[in-house]
Amino acid sequence: MLYWLAFGRARLKQEIALRTVLDFGALPLQKEFVEFLKNEAMRGRTLYLATASDRSLAEPVAKRLGIFKQVLASDRHSNLKGTRKLEAILCCCNDTAFDYAGNARVDLAIWAKARRAIIVNPDIGVMTAVRKRRYGVEKVFDDRPSRTKTWLHAIRPQQWAKNLLLGVPVLTAHAFNFSAIAQIALAFLAFGLVASATYVLNDLLDMISDRHHPRKCKRPFASGNIDLASGILGMLALFGAGFGLAAQLSDYFLFTLLAYLVLTISYSFYFKHIALINVLLLASLYTLRIIAGAYTIEVPMSSWLLEFSMFIFLSISLVKRCAELIPLQQVATKNRKCRDYQVSDYSILSAMGVASGYLSIGVLALFIGSPESIGKYTYPGLLWLLCPLMAYWVSRLWLKTARGEMHDDPLVFSLKDQASWIVFINMLMVTLVSI
C-alpha cells in the first residue's frame, strides 16, 4: 500500500477497490434522504453522484438507486475530494447554481459555492462549522440515535452482569472485607471493558452478515451509525483500559483475563461453529470468571466450586443452544442447522443439559455433607435448603426453554426474571445465615 501511495491517493484507492468485494445491495442507506432524492428526481431535477470514493465502488451504488444522470468519482489519476470535487461539479453544471448534499468538513469548500447546503448524517463539528459560516441550509437529515446510546448498544454493558460471577469466591471463602470487595470491583470493571472490546470486535467481523439479518442489521456498525475507524479506535481503547486495570491487580488475574480473551476470540473465529466444543468453551468462559475472582482476592480455588461450576455452566450453555433451535423447529425442516446443530438434535441436547444441571445439584449435596462444609460453616445443616432452590431454578430454566420463552442469553434472562431473583436472594440469605 505504501508503494501505491507513492503514486498518490487516487492510485491507492483504486488498488484497494480492485481487491474489495462489497455487497452493494446490503449497504445501509439514509432512507429519508434517499426518499427526498427520489422525489426531487420525479420533479425533474438532475442529480449527480459526486464522491471521493473510487469509481468502481460508486457506480454500483448509483445503479442500485437509478436516479443519477452521471457519477463523478475518483479514478486512477484523480482523487475527487474537496476543491477537486468542486471543480468537477462546476464543470458538470456549466457554472450554474447547484445544491450540494454532504456530511464532512471537507465539504465546506463546496457548500461555500453552492446555492443551498443539504446536510446528511454529519460528522462531529460539521453543523457548528456550517452555522458559523452562515451557509444557506435547505435541509438536515440525521436518522442516527445519540452517540452515547449508540456506543452503549455497541459495548453492551448489560452483558457485564455475567461478571458478578467474579464475586462468588468472596462468598465461598467468607472474605467479607473492604479490601476484597474493592479488588473484586476493579476486576469486574476490567473484565467488563475487555468483554465490551470483544463485542465490538465481533460486530466488526460480522458486519457484512449482520446486514442481511432482519434484527442484527440494526446493530451500530451494520447500520452505519458508528463508522469503521471509530469502531477500531474504540475497541483498542477498551482493550487498553481493561488490561491497564488488570495490571493493577495480581499477575494471576492478568493471565486469567488474557486466557479469557484468547478463548473468546478463538470461539468467535472458529469454535462457535463446532458442535459440542462450543458449549464446552462457553461453560469454560463462565468458570474462568470465578477462577479470576479467586485470584483477585488471593484465596485458594475450591475443587467443590470448580466441579459445581463445570456442570451448572454446561447446563446453561446447552440452554442457550436449545433456545436457538426452538424457533427453527417451527419454521424449518429437520435438517436446518444453527451453529452446526440440527433441529433434530434438540432432544439429545436438552437431555444432556438437564442431566448436567442436576449433576451440579448432586455436587452441591455432596459438598454439604462433606467434612469441609462442617469446618467452614457454623450451621452447615441449613445449607441443605440450597438444593431444592437450585432444583427449582434449573428446572425452571429448562421448562422455559422447552416452551420457547427463553432469552438468547440464559443469564440475562435470569437477571430479568422475578422468580430467579427470589431464588438467588433466598440462596444468599441461607448461605449468610449458615456462615
Image (tube, helix red, strand yellow):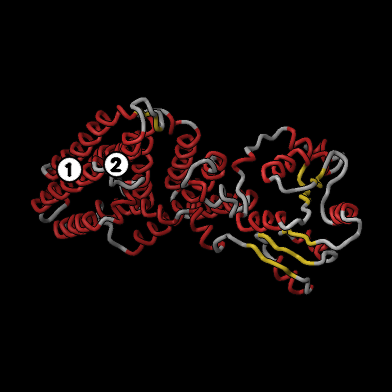
Q: Is residue 51 left or right of residue 364?
A: right
Q: Is residue 353 left or right of residue 154?
A: left
Rendered residue at 53%/63% (across/down): 148
Which residue lies most toward the top here? 335
Rendered residue at 65%/60% (across/down): 121
At label 1, the amino acid type is: Leu
Residue 298 shows up from this direction: no
Q: Which residue is mark 1?
A: 364
On screen, residue 250 above or below 178: above
As measured in the structure, the alpha-carbon distance from the residue carrying label 1 to the one carrying label 2 is 17 Å
Which of the numbered marks, if any, corresponds to residue 316?
2
Which image quadrant for residue 318? top left
Name the image quarter holding the C terminus.
Answer: bottom left
- Helix, strand or loop under label 2: helix
Residue 22 shows up from this direction: yes
Question: Which of the two residues, 278 or 294, is positioned nearer the viewer here?
Answer: 278
Question: Which of the two residues, 265 or 411, is positioned nearer the viewer here?
Answer: 411
Which image quadrant for residue 127? bottom right
Residue 71 spot, x, y in % from top left? 79, 46
Q: Is residue 363 left or right of residue 264?
A: left
